[in-house]
Amino acid sequence: MDNDLNGRRNGVITRNGSNSVNNSQDMEEIIDREDTPESDKCAHYSNEDSDSEFGASASEEDSSGIYYYFLIVYIIGNMRIKYLDVDEEEYERRRNLFFSEMADLEKQFLALKEQLYAERLTQIDKKLEEVKAGRAQEYLQPLEELQENMRVRTEVAGILKQLKLENVQCQYKAEIMAAKQHFESETQLLKEQIRQDLEEKLKRLEEDRNSIDSDIWESCSTKKRKKYGNISSNGYEYGPGRDQLNLPDRRRKPVTVSGPYIVYMLKEADIIEDWTSIRKAIKASGSVAYF
């Protein structure tokens, strides 16, 4: 090489002044030195990141960075070649060299991309198998949380069920008690109503008995006076009767009972039966003289 290499500045090959590169072999060596560390670096990243969960995406980003790095090198190299004092043949050779390098880089990038895709797909399939088998940590931790939540909710549901059952039992007992109290109240009211009806019937029967007795006594006395006249206590007549003397007939007024009544401790059927027997006896005797 005629000119000394100053070094690399920001990934771009530079030389002092505007001197040209006369030796094509030196240029190839420089390009090889530029390519070798980055290629090794790319391969190193690919091998390391494929073992982790996010290795595929990181390697893909690194390969993209390498691709754009060489693209920038290519563009800047083309720009700097314009200012180099080289002939047309050398320029064409370098141009073809850069194109071939870019084609190789694209092929490497596509191959690396396919490799990363396959590795990522393999990792996903492996993780899916672990999840299905129940061994994945990403699956076990949420599963434990879900099981704990299920246990708590089941316990709360059991307590709520017990409280609801107790509430239903209390409501059932309250309804049974209310039904019994209502039945007893209605029974007491019915008994009281029947008792009042019986007392009213007894009062009416007593009034009817008293009024009928008075009417019967008065009618019998009138018939006797008309037939026999005045009769003494020994059975002999001592004068004309009241109807013979044309005296006004003094009838007994019907007795009206008021105030407290005598309540017999008899049933209504017994009272009616006794009253019927008394009336039959009165009709059979035909007279009330011996009353």
Image (cartoon, rainbow, N blue to C red):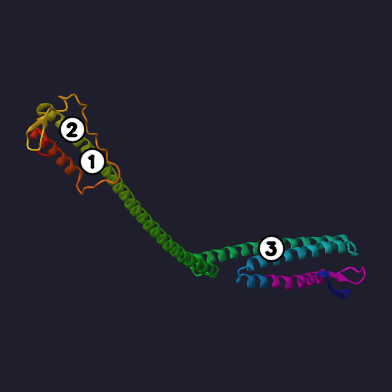
Foreground pick, 228 / 47: 228
Please rate how many residues cluster around mark 1, counting C-alpha atoms within 10 Å: few if below 14, some from 14 to 19, many from 20: some
Quarter the C terminus occupies: top left
Please rate how many residues cluster around mark 3, counting C-alpha atoms within 10 Å: few if below 14, some from 14 to 19, many from 20: some
Residue 23 visible within the image:
no
Foreground pick, 145 / 232: 232
Given the image, on which type of amino acid does mark 2 rest?
Glu
Horizontally, is 215 left or right of 239 in the view?
right
- Residue drawn 80% across and 63% down? 72
Q: What residue would you read off at disc 3?
A: 109
Foreground pick, 153 / 9: 153
Tell me which corner region of the image, top left, top right, bottom left or bottom right, holds residue 6: bottom right
Image: 252 above or below 19: above
Horizontally, is 170 left or right of 249 in the view?
right
Q: What residue would you read off at disc 1?
A: 206
Horizontally, is 27 left or right of 151 in the view?
right
Q: x, y percentage for residue 35?
A: 75, 70
Of pointers 3 and 2, the one earlier in the residue sequence: 3
Q: What residue would you read off at disc 2?
A: 218
Residue 15 is marked as none
Tell me which corner region of the image, top left, top right, bottom left or bottom right, holds residue 172: bottom left
Given the image, on which type of amino acid does mark 3 rest?
Phe
Of pointers 2 and 1, the one earlier in the residue sequence: 1
Magenta residues?
A: 13-42
User: Magenta part mainly helix, strand or loop?
Assistant: helix
Q: How many marks?
A: 3
For discs 2 and 1, the disc positioned in front in the rendered view: 2
Badge 1 element: helix
